[in-house]
Structure formats: C-alpha cells, structure tokens
Amino acid sequence: MKDMEFAYYNSRVAKKAPGLGKRDLLRESINEAKKHRMPVIAYCQIQYDSSSSRAHPEWRMKDAGGKDIGGRLCYRSGYLEFIKQVAAEMMEYEIEGFHFDMLDFGFGPPHGCWCNICRKDFRRKYGIDMPDGVTWDNAWDQMLQFRCDSNTDFCRQLQSSVKAKRPDVAVDFNYHGYPPFNWVEGQEPVRHANNGDFVTAEGLPFKFGHYNPSLLALFMKGARDDRLVQGVTSRSVFDYHDFTVRPTADLKWEVFTYLAHGCQCTVVDKANYEGTCDPAVYDRLGRIFEEALQKRELFGHRPVQEVGLYYSARTRDWFARDDTPKYMQAVWGAHKALVQSHITLGFVMDESVSLERLREFPVIYIPHAAILIERETELFRQYVAGGGNLLITGLTGTYDKFGQFVTASPLASLIGAKLARIQADHPDNYIRLPGQLAEGQGKFLLDGIPADWPILTWGPLAVHEPTGATPFGELLVAHRTPKNIWDWRMSPDKVVGPAVLVNRIGKGAVVTVPCALDAAYAGDYRVPEHRKLIRNVIRHLNPRPPIQVDAPLNVEIAVSRNDADRRLHVHLISFTGPPTSADVAFSKGSRVLPPLMEEELPYRASIRVAREFRNATVSEPNASIFAQGRTIILETSNCHTVVTIVMRESA
C-alpha cells in the first residue's frame, strides 16, 4: 500500500499512484477479502522512500562529511511522524496488520548516519563525538550500538503508535539480523528479531541457497523470545520481479520446510502491470495450502533438538568485519553438515545465552566463534561440569572482543590444551586420522573416513599443545613453493599439531577440532569427510538421541513432541532437483544456477526410536511404514511426510 514512490489507497499525506485515478486498491482488496474471510495485511516500505526524500531533504541520512546518503532517511528525524500518519490512515480501513519493510542502514557504505540530530544524540549518550567513519575501536563499538538503537527505537515507537490506536492490529518488521547479513545493515540477531508481534525474514533459495529456508527458520526461532516466526518466499524463479512461476513441488518443499520447523509462511506474488493475477500461481498455491491445512494438527509442537548451534554476533561483527564468510561460512557449513546427517538442531545466540538455554541441548556446537567473552566461557564451564557436551571448531576463543588475537585462549581449561599459535597465512591445511585409531579410544572418528588419508580443510587452523586432553590424529600444513602459481593449493607437508582433542570435565566432555572443517564443507573444496567427522563427534558425545534417522542426504528431518498425548512427530522434508548448470562469464566470474524441483521422488528411510513405543502412523495415504522392534521403515514419494509415534506411558 506504500512503496518508495506512491500510496495505493486514498492517502492524504503520501502521493497516490497517478495511474489509479479514483481507484482505491486497499478498499477493493478489503471488500474482496471479506467475501472469503481473509485477513488483509498492509505492506509499507520504510527505507529508500524516494518521494519523502525529495520532499523533505532535512530527513535524509548524512555521511561523515555531511553529504546526503541517497535513498536513506534518518530514523531519528521527522520521518517517524510521517510514517505514523501513513499507518494511521491505513488503520481507518479494516486491515488486520502491517508489514513494514526495509528497516536497514543500506547494504554498503557509508555505514550509519552523521546528521546533526544523530551527532547530538550520540554525544549526549556517550559523552564523545561520533567517529568519522569506521575505526574499529571502542568509539566504533558505541557507534554500532547507537545505529542499532536508532533502528529499534524507530520500530518500537511506530508499533506503540499503531497499538495505541488499534491494539488488535498486528505489526511486523522485515528482519536483516540473520545470515548472511552482518553489521552493515545495522541489526543484531536477537534484539531486532524481537521487534514487532513476530519476526519475518526472506528465505529465497534462488539467492541464498537451498539450505537457507531451514537455516532461516531455525535461526529466527533461536533469536525470537516467543518463537513466533514467519518465513517469506516468492512465486518467481529468480526474484520477486520476474513473471515466472516455480513448479508446485519446488514451492511446496519450501513452504513445508517452514511449517515443519514451527513457522508460518508467506509467498509473495507480483500482479501483472494492469492489475490482474496469474491463475497458475493460485492453482499451485491452492494445492499446497490445502495439504498444509489437512496437516495443521502436526505442526507447532515443542521441538526435540539434539544440537545447539552457537552463533556469535560479536564474532560476526568484530572478527569477520567486512569479510562476511570469514565467520559465516563455518555456520553455514555446520548447519549443512547437521541437516545432511539428520541431526536435529536449534540455534543458541550469544546475545541471549543462559545456562538454562544451553541445558536444553545434549550437545552445544561452537563453530569458529573467534570471539567469546568471559561471561560466555563461564556459562560453558558450568554447562559441561553439569553433564553437557561441547564441540568446538576452528579458531573459537582465540580473539578478544575487539577482534585482536589473544596469546592465551580463555577456553584453555575447557579444551585441555594450550594455544601455541594460529596458522592463518595459508588456507590449505589438512586433517589425517591414522589407522591405529581403530584399535583404541579414537575409533569413533574413523566411521566412514579413510584412515591415513589427508583431508583438505580449507581455512585457518589453531595449533594446540595438550595439557589434559587426549589428542587424536594430526593437523598438517601444505607445502610452500613461492614460484608456483598454485601456491595456495598444495599437497600436505608436515604435522603441526593434533587434529582432535577430547577432554573430560565433570560429567561432561569437550571435543575440539581446531580447524575450519565446517567452513570447508560450505566452500569450494567440500568433501563428505568434513560432514562425517562432525557427525562422528556428535554421535560420540550423544550416542542415544530420542530419534535417529537414516535417509538420503537430500532429506531433512524435524522432530517435535506433543506432550499432551505422548506423540512424537518426525517430519521428513526432501528436495530433489536435477544437476545444476552454470552462468559463466569469465570477466565477471561464474554463478551456479540453482535447480528447480519438479518431481516428488520416492525414497526409503529408517527411524530408530530410543524407547519403546505403542504404534506409528504416517501422514501420506500413498506412503507405507512397518515396525521392526524399535525401528520404523518408511517408504514415501512425498517431499513432506510425517511419521507420528505414540510413546508408551513409561517413556
């Protein structure tokens, strides 16, 4: 109803789209929706409001030199009162909610607002002048917080204004605190996920990859206190603005990924230029939504999650800084490895971490979180001492809060080893697991991994000297030949330290793999052994989870529990697409085109239940299951299938 130029209803404060004439699209939409008892949510764009920027130059964001920042309006300016007026107008109609879009500071430099209002407010709050640009010091730390405060205060004042007039109207804000977004957009994962009545963000597999709907759903669930989460996708193949329509199976897979993880889902359609809609979109959505309604009793129950995947916003901002994959790739790879291993997970956030939250998971996995502050490490110590298990990878705990290397890791007592040095100058490093491990305590590491074979783990590594931990395997650096043009992709050379460290503390255990094998699994040189080593460690730390699933790699699982009637719901979501092609232009690099899923193909899976159960049923009429002791065998040809297991009272 309001974009960067026009309003699409009879507005008194915003410029109405000139092509509408006397038409009022909001009134027309509400009148039609009433016939079908459909709620109407009004879309309102915030940033990149070109018409407001032209009319009110005093609202524009300024760079450090005092120049206007194109398309961006200051959150502390009079623009807030204008948006409140726009919202008040729309609430004169029978709308049931708002979606406020584009609450960011842009997606590139300059990174903030240096207008006179912001400069005065910053000095009043911190007692110093704003840093004139990115300085990566204490003043910049305060600047990052100030930016986040500006955004959050805008959202909360706008929501309060809406609720004061109509408490029944829902409010949500488009969210950019999730991967792959970093400090640039000015949003923190937890703080900004808790703005609004629920949190909304975009999955978009054509942009962020086919693992992103799952990662997004789980990430927002971990960031949002009340777990009220919405994923958004598009009917189109490439973005929101082309007039293609995704195949039914492709859309269904994404919609049911959100639903299986306890989220709601919105699919964005784009009307034709003259205002008509494409019937193919609604034919396909109709079939998907009909199935979702038939299964609605299977969604929204308490998740059963084995691994808590730890996310460090401080590492995102102060270690990775402008090189987002420097940290984020390890998170992507960890999520991908767990999903393909059929290990259920949830996210644990550094902003809101507590001992109670940690104890919800048998295993906490900390992938490459270079920056951990004292409060975090103390919580990890208490968690492990009480029987929890940690998996630590990469350079976790080797940098201070400002992103500077520390010579003594705060995790040394947990790891059971002293940090000797970091090998970060060359990324081609290797893990080797000797065959002799098969005869001792380290045999769990070799499941599915060739013995004595160096596995390339592209990324940095940390060299540790054990002080109490038991070391297994070897980390190797590559050969160095300065005159070789492939100097960064050489074969393994010498051993520099142990590959795996196992340390028992109290009732718990800590396993450290001090190289970036998870980051490698999301990178150019990914191999199955990265995933298998992660799986082997998790299964060693937690050998008997409530549910273990053996299924093809393209199948994701989500498990939930209905405590009222002792039912476990095992959701199996499969994506099956043809091999991909590439759009190659050597002057611009290459881009892999993601596949589209056209068919729901059959597969077979087994579900092992840790305790005795009464019976099991399956959601799909054309699927089959049969039980063999505590193992359930499933055969299905649906991209979403739910196996419901009724547990015995003693379980």
Image (cartoon, rainbow, N blue to C red):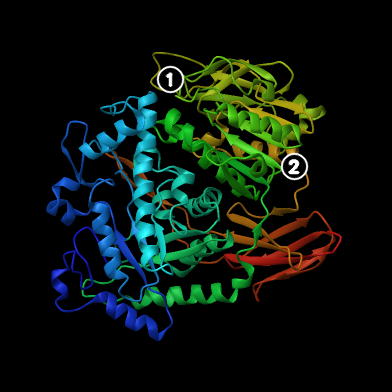
The quarter of the picture where residue 266 lies is: bottom left
CA distance for labels 1 and 2: 40 Å
Label 2 secondary element: loop
How crowded pointer 2 is (Cα within 10 Å; few <14, some 14-19, many 20+) is rated as some
Is residue 586 visible in the rendered image? The answer is yes
Farthest bottom residue in view:
35
- For the point 58% across and 25% down, the residue is 430
Where residue 328 appears, x then y in whole percent? 47, 37
The answer to whether the residues at label 1 and label 2 have Cβ atoms under 8 Å apart is: no
- Say which quarter of the image contains residue 51: bottom left
x and y percentages locating residue 262 in the rendered image: 57, 61
Which of 347/215 is in front?
A: 347
Give the quadrant of the N terminus: bottom left
For this rendering, which residue is in front, 515 or 297?
A: 297
Q: Which quarter shows the C terminus? A: bottom right
Q: Can residue 111 be seen at all in this image of the molecule?
A: no
Q: Which residue is mark 1?
A: 487
Residue in the foreground of this view, choosing between 375 and 398: 375
Q: Amino acid at mark 1?
A: Asp
Disc number placed over residue 542 in the picture, else none? 2
The relative height of residue 552 versus residue 634 in the rendered view (above or below) is: above
| Residue 539 x %, y % | 73, 41
Q: Residue 325: x, y in percent?
A: 44, 35
User: Residue flagged by tag 2: what amino acid is it?
Assistant: Asn
What is the secondary structure assignment of the residue under circle 1?
A: loop
Residue at x 36% of width, y 54% of height: 157
Q: Residues within 10 Å of mark 1 (few under 14, many from 20)?
A: some
Instruction: Tell me: 244 left or right of 190.
Output: left
Task: Please determine whether, in this image, residue 516 is positioned above or below residue 623.
Answer: above
Q: Is residue 38 left or right of residue 530?
A: left
